[in-house]
């Protein structure tokens, strides 16, 4: 199936690793032009080279911290300056942050909201005028399935993610008439740096493969997912194949969430 992504210009934040990297690779395979953002220049360069080796696509590498408003503005402007347009935005930059309520101080609350909620707001606010100019666009906000049913010790991330889901729905209502679609994917457990660090911290007695298949995760499909499995869904959502889908949240979680 042709996803209609050839020559489209996409900006992916948190793109050097995990889901952001896999999404960048998938978009490059589909022929999109690509800007990739992360804070660490070296790992971004390694990721960009891997994409070039696999697809022949030279991406625009932009270092930036998506918790900072000015950096969000700059990554959008640099993308448009380089490619002349912007059609797709994947707000993916994020980190694992789950603690009990009384362990979360204001600095932690603020950082999490700055990165996960305001990062998406700032990037989108700067991207929308360019999308409108092109006659439309697509935004995917990467959030988390646990935002829907927050467990204990899941702060501040579940709150930031629930806000990201509300942001998605409200933006989709505001921007639909400009043919700008806004959706969210709610991630369960996907193999990534975050997950490997969590495995090392909480289950060092297990091999990574044992951890991935451990029944304690209560994943009906029996395993933690691959980044590529999330990337394919995100790529579909930003593509013309999803042209009538907006304001939707899609769980990518092997059935783990207790809600639709
Ligand atoms: N993996 C899961 O099971 C899971 C579950 C729920 C939600 N999520 C969400 O899904 C998204 C992707 O997760 P992942 O597991 O693929 O993460 P990952 O493997 O840890 O990769 C995170 C990426 O984001 C970048 N990044 C982190 N902080 C950033 C910042 N302040 N500004 C710009 N870039 C930043 C990192 O590069 P630098 O460090 O160089 O900046 C890296 O490229 C995140 O938003 C995460 O919270 C993941």
Image (tube, rainbow, N blue to C red):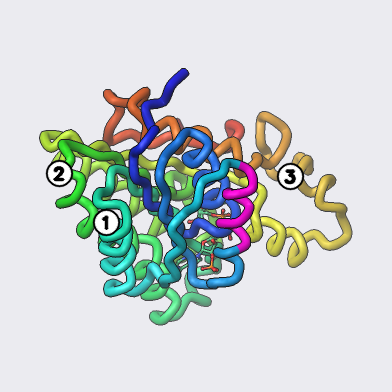
Picture quadrant where residue 179 is located: top left
- Residue under label 1, please give it: 80
* Magenta-drawn stretch, dominant element (helix, strand or loop): helix
Q: The residue tagged with tag 1: helix, strand or loop?
A: helix
Q: Residue at x 26, y 63 (%)?
A: 77
How many numbered discs, if any?
3
Judging depth in this view, the residue of 101 and 1 nearest the camera is 1
Q: The residue tagged with tag 3: helix, strand or loop?
A: helix
Residue 257 percent location from the top left of the image: 53, 38
Residue 10 percent location from the top left of the image: 37, 47
Q: Which mark identifies residue 132?
A: 2
Q: CA distance from mark 2 to mark 3?
A: 46 Å
Q: Residue at x 88, y 60 (%)?
A: 205
Residue 198 percent location from the top left of the image: 69, 61
Q: Residue at x 39, y 49 (%)?
A: 90
Picture quadrant where residue 69 is located: bottom left
How many other residues sit within 10 Å of disc 1, few (<14), some (14-19) or many (≥20)? some
Q: Residue at x 25, y 52 (%)?
A: 84
- Residue under label 3, please give it: 216
Residue 125 visible in the shown view? yes
Which region is colored magenta?
A: 46-54
On whether ligand 1 comes within 8 Å of the CB at mark 2, the answer is: no
Among all residues in the image, which is located at the extreme top? 1
Q: Mark 2 or mark 3: which comes first in sequence?
A: 2
Q: Mark 2 or mark 1: which comes first in sequence?
A: 1
On whether ligand 1 comes within 8 Å of the CB at mark 1, the answer is: no
Q: The residue tagged with tag 2: helix, strand or loop?
A: helix
How many other residues sit within 10 Å of disc 2, few (<14), some (14-19) or many (≥20)? some
* Mark in front: 2 vs 3: 2
Picture quadrant where residue 37 is located: bottom left
Quadrant location, the C terminus: top left
* Mark in front: 2 vs 1: 1
């Amino acid at each position: 199936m042709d996803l209609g992504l050839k020559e489209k210009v996409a900006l992916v934040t948190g793109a050097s690793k995990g889901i952001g990297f896999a999404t960048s690779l998938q978009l490059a395979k589909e022929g999109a032009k690509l800007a990739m953002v992360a804070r660490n220049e070296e790992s971004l360069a390694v990721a960009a080279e891997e994409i070039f080796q696999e697809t022949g696509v030279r991406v625009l590498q932009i270092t930036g911290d998506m918790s900072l408003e000015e950096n969000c503005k700059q990554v959008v402007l640099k993308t448009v300056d380089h490619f002349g347009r912007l059609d797709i935005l994947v707000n993916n930059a994020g980190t694992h942050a789950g603690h009990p309520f009384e362990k979360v101080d204001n600095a932690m609350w603020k950082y999490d909201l700055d990165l996960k909620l305001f990062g998406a707001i700032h990037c989108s606010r700067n991207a929308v005028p360019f999308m409108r100019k092109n006659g439309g666009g697509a935004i995917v906000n990467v959030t988390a399935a646990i935002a829907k049913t927050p467990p204990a010790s899941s702060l501040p991330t579940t709150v930031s993610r629930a806000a990201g889901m509300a942001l998605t729905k409200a933006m989709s209502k505001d921007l639909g008439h400009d043919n700008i679609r806004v959706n969210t994917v709610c991630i369960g457990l996907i193999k990534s740096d975050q997950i490997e660090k969590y495995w090392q911290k909480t289950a060092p007695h297990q091999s990574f493969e044992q951890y991935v298949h451990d029944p304690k995760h209560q994943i009906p499909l029996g395993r933690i997912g691959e980044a590529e499995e999330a990337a394919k869904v995100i790529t579909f959502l930003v593509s013309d194949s999803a042209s009538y889908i907006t304001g939707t949240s899609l769980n990518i979680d092997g059935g783990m969430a207790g809600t639709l």
